[in-house]
Each structure stands twice: as C-alpha cells, then as structure tokens.
Amino acid sequence: MNKKIVILIIFILILIGVGVWYFLFYQKNNQVTENEIIPEEEISEEQMRQTIVSLYFYNDTTKSLASEGRLIDAKELVNEPYKKLMEMLISGPQNSNLTKTIPDGTKINKAELKGDILYLDLSKEFIENHVGGEEQESITIYSIVNTMTRLTEVNAVKILIDGEENKAFKDSKIKFDDPFVVIKEEDKIENSNTITNE
C-alpha cells in the first residue's frame, strides 16, 4: 500500500513539474513572440496606401528652390504619375514660405516617358504668361526638373509647347532645344522638410 502511495505522489509531482514548466517557460516565450507580431495600433488601409512626394517651389527667404513634401494616396500616382506631379506644381505650394513657379493658365497636354527622358508637352500659356527674366525662367524649369527626377526612372525632362519642340521663353534666354537635367550642386537646393497632406 505504501509503495502505491509513493508512486502516486511521484506521478503527481511529475505532473505538477511539467505544468509549472509549461506555464513558466513555454507560455512566456510564446507570449513574447505574439506581442512582437501584433502591432500596438492597427494600420488602416488608407495609411498603407500613402506615399510622400517632393515638389520643388521657390523659397522667397533663401532665394532658391526648396522641396515641399506632400503625403498623397499612392493610387493617384499609378496611372499618370508625371501628370499628377505636374498638376500639383501648377496648383502651387501649401507652405506659405514657398511660391508657385508655374505660370497661371498652364495646361498639361501630355506627359510621356521615353527611355529615361520625360517628354512634357505644355500649353502655350507656359511661355506666354511667364513673368520673364533668365533667373525666374530657370527657377520655373528646375522646379519641374527637380520634382520629376526624384522619380528613379526619370533622368531628364524635355519640354514641348503644344506638341512643338525647340521653343523658348519670350525673351529667348532659355531655349527648350535639349532635355534639362537636374542641378547637381546640392547647395543650390534647400530642403524645407515640410510634409503636408494634399
């Protein structure tokens, strides 16, 4: 009888030991893994689709181009990304320290990527409504070029006016004969680091 009781007690102690081990080690380790997988705050479908784009406008204080970050729905860039970015440039900045660089009335006839060059066909208002002056014209051109070349597939921008090549601004200081490439001197571009929702 005593032998059976001793075996029963040993068996119960083994069961208790296994139970303690299970709860102290196995459960605790699994809990850590579960906590690592489950985020504290669930990310909405809308937040997952958002992306930041950089648009270049004129900064009146620094007298140079500055980027304005915009948080937009990535779906808006799927079909016609170049046209969408151009529309945003035409609309102007949301940051009050920055100034619009594209002349009023400018329309986008077509935006097409050929190789690594973006062919941007704009309406005649782009040259007719421009204030003029080589510096202002350069600012207008490079606000477009710097914005578009932030996209990895674009290395240069060729500007056409109503489908015609080799046009120029009214004073003929800046001609559109060749594609424009991004300004390489980083000190000429200021990054304002402002992100706003469109």
Image (tube, rainbow, N blue to C red):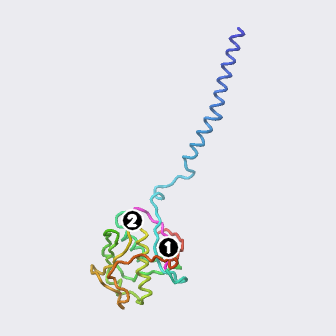
| Residue of label 2 | 77
124 or 191: which is nearer to us?
Answer: 191
**Which residue is located at x 49 percent, y 79 percent?**
65
**Earlier residue among tags 1 and 2:** 1
Disc 1 and disc 2 in contact, CB within 8 angstroms: no
Q: As shown in the figure, which amino acid type bears the numbered disc 1?
A: Glu
State the extent of the magenta-drawn residues as a range: 65-77
Residue 141, x across and y down, in percent = 40, 80
Asked whether 183 or 7 is in front, the reply is 183
What kind of residue is marked 2? Leu
Which quarter of the picture shows residue 30? Answer: top right
Residue 13 spot, x, y in % from top left = 68, 22
Considering the numbered disc 1 on the image, is that residue within a helix, a strand or a loop? strand
Quarter of the rendering occupied by the N terminus? top right
Q: Position of residue 60 (x, y in %)?
A: 52, 83
Quick check: is 68 in the magenta stretch?
Answer: yes
**Callout 1 crowding tier (Cα within 10 Å): few <14, some 14–19, many ≥20:** many
Q: Is residue 46 left or right of residue 3?
A: left
Numbered label attached to residue 68: 1
Residue 34 lies, with reference to residue 135, above or below; the image says above
Q: Is residue 17 above or below residue 180?
A: above
Majority secondary structure in the magenta region: strand
Q: Which of the two residues, 94 or 173, is positioned nearer the viewer here? A: 173
User: What is the CA distance from the residue labelled 1 to the residue labelled 2?
Assistant: 17 Å
Q: How many numbered circles does the render carry? A: 2
